[in-house]
Amino acid sequence: MKSSQPLGSLTKFITIALVCCTGLSASAERPPNIVFFLTDDQGVSTIGCYGNEVVRTPNIDRLADQGTRFENAFVSQPICWVSRTTILTGLTGRSYGTPSNPDVARPDAVETLYTDILRENGYRTAHIGKWHAKMPKGWKAQDHFDEYDAIGRDPFYKTLPDGSLRHETDLIVDRGIDFIKRQGKDKPFSLNLWFNACHAEDSDRRPGIGQFPWPESTNGMYEDITIAPPRLGDPEIFEKLPEFLQTSITRERYFWRWNTPEKYQTNIRAYYRMVTGIDNAIGRFLSALDEADLTDNTIIVYSADNGYLMGNRGLAGKWSHYEESTHVPLIIRDPRVSTDHQGQVTDAIALNLDLPSTFLDWAGIKPPERYQGTSLKPIVDGKKPEDWRTETFHEHFAVRDRIPAFEGIRNERFKYDRYIDHDQEFLHDLEKDPDELINLANDPEYAAILKSMRERTNAEVDRLGGPLDPLKGGFKASTAAHPESTASVSFKAGKDGFVRLFNGKNLNGWTGEPKYWSVRNGAITGVTDGKLKRNHFISWEGSTIRNFDLRMKVKISNGGNSGIQYRSTPRPEIGLDVVSGYQCDVVSNNSNYNGMVYEERQRRILSHAGEKVIVDPKGQPWVVGKFTTKDPAPDKWHDFRILAQGNRIQHWIDGHPTAELIDLDEKGRSLDGVLAMQVHVGPAMEVQFKDIRIKHLPDNLPLITPDKAPIPATAYGVRPQAKLPKDWKPPVYGEQ
């Protein structure tokens, strides 16, 4: 008997009936879209919903209010590329590598990523942003996504076709928004938006805009507040660390970023701007998701590839067994979850290892047997399994010759780790000592716990791939625990004690606009066409400089105006290349200015050439002596020398002193900062610098105090940089 109703109409009728009877919406029948925001180097202490009352993260906080916030999310290995590869493969680092070369993934381990499985099951996949995974030779990331757009840092600011600059955070989200605008509702998508922020720009150690370049949307934020110092910054905490941690790369980079209060404040503000910049970009993306009518069926995941020490324990980076390194934010907003479970906070222990299993579970796909994580979907749905894990395995073996390698396990009460190349065990009672300040490994009272956790660690090591091969070549210290000069920790001086800052071939180690700076005839060369609207600078990226003997050869064209800046502060609110601070002027045909002490955009002229000056505690410079100077000829090479010792500064040109200054102004002076050179507004000119070398002197040179530098009554005021009346006379100190 034939049906009197066409099959298509009958199918449509049945579908409508099922929707009506079950209450399911059309969107609920479709697999969800998945958007995965992954930040770099971010612990839980830098997000509002995790308790930070300073940093502003309203959009991330909103995701937590509408989703699930994990209090106990960790990474299995706290370093960028291993953590990211773990997410892609569902395997710990020990499991995807080999005992002899654990840094690089085996071909079989990365043949199929979780994104490949999603794609095979009808998803459109895209990866935009940071990649940084160490894959086998010949392996191509673009083969594993429908769309692949790797956007790295160095520099963070990318030049667009129209010549403008765009921060990588905003650029990644721009392209993410473009991706979702092109998606229809007939096919689900999985979109990775992996940021480079909040990773430091390791090659650029200028505080603030150099180390932690932030998006334009956060310019000026946090500038008016003093941020609390590291909570675990007490020097006694550092002194109790074993020597291999005190001299590792984590200590070296502490001197790059956090070792002085001024550097800490500059860098932590910049870091917070990076965080808020990410939040602003996420806000734009969420609005675009709403406009595309995709919000109701799109799951948002926010996490980080590892934590960040941020000066705690006297360390930087993320390479340690401590909680600051492994504890990361994890927020998941699934709009399909019942309102009863939106805004929930869970204490379930989660790992980055769980994420690929979770993504596949959301898509209705059974994770491969090889995956070592567990789906978080039941927890997000508000149903934490009764047999949920209570213990996790953690390790670190990357860059093993400079970063101490460890392995161990952690549960709700105790944490065990051993540094495998250093014969050192740690046992912490997280309940009594959540800051991990007391090592119980040698306490007889805890011997049974130590033995049990050691054995369980052995079992996990065997299960996940076995012990690593012995370290070849031994461990190499990166720095002294307390170097005499912190500016010299990353640079080897020659036999004469000087570090060469310019190789004579290219601008490696320097940053400046190519329009004005290049290398010509073996010299850093700055040129202008006479149309500059502001000064432009080229800065040394290698370190800040404190106490030093700086020498270089300089040649300037007739009528030219330039300068050598030192102990300077970056001023990105004016321009990304701008600095302000002490300056040794380089001026042709003006013996009154050539070699003087000047402060760009601050106190201005502190000492004309030929003047010995004392700057009083209120910032007024007084001439206390004079000496004869010479006027070096333009278009010829001259030897410039700057000696900075505490608050005493001296300049020479061709061996002749041009300025000597004692700065008693504690508020106005700078004792540490950036080295730079400039091209100045005014006539067209060319200035060249070569044979640039610096000898770093001890950090703790004594400061001259007012009682050691009395200003004589006959001293008179330095002529200021201003239009003065014809009858102007300098003030006399004794008449004040």
Image (tube, rainbow, N blue to C red):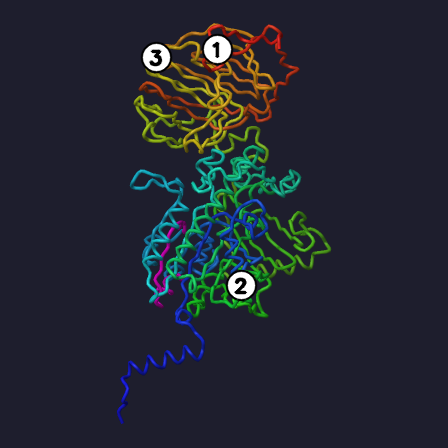
The residue at the point 40 percent across, 24 percent down is 678
Q: Residues within 10 Å of mark 2 (few under 14, many from 20)?
A: many
Task: Kindly identify which numbered label has been placed on residue 342.
Answer: 2
Name the amino acid type tagged 1.
Answer: Pro
Verify whether residue 688 appears in magenta. no
Considering only vertical position in the picture, is 600 above or below 368? above
Residue positioned 43% across, 46% down in the render: 196
In magenta, the rendered stretch is: 113-133
Determine which of the numbered discs, if any, sits on residue 634 in the image.
3
Q: Secondary structure at mark 3?
A: loop
Name the element at disc 2. loop
Q: Disc 1 or 3, which lies upstream in sequence? A: 3
Q: Nearer the viewer, mark 2 or mark 3?
A: 2
Q: Quadrant of residue 559?
A: top left
The residues bearing labels 1 and 2 have C-alpha atoms spaced at a distance of 71 Å
Q: Residue furthest bottom?
A: 1
Left or right: where does residue 5 sit relative to residue 507?
left
Q: Amino acid at mark 2?
A: Gln
Give the percent coordinates (x, y) of residue 499. Answer: 46, 26
Image quadrant in which the C terminus is located: top right
Badge 3 amino acid: Pro
* Disc sitting over residue 375 in the figure: none
The answer to whether residue 655 is visible is yes
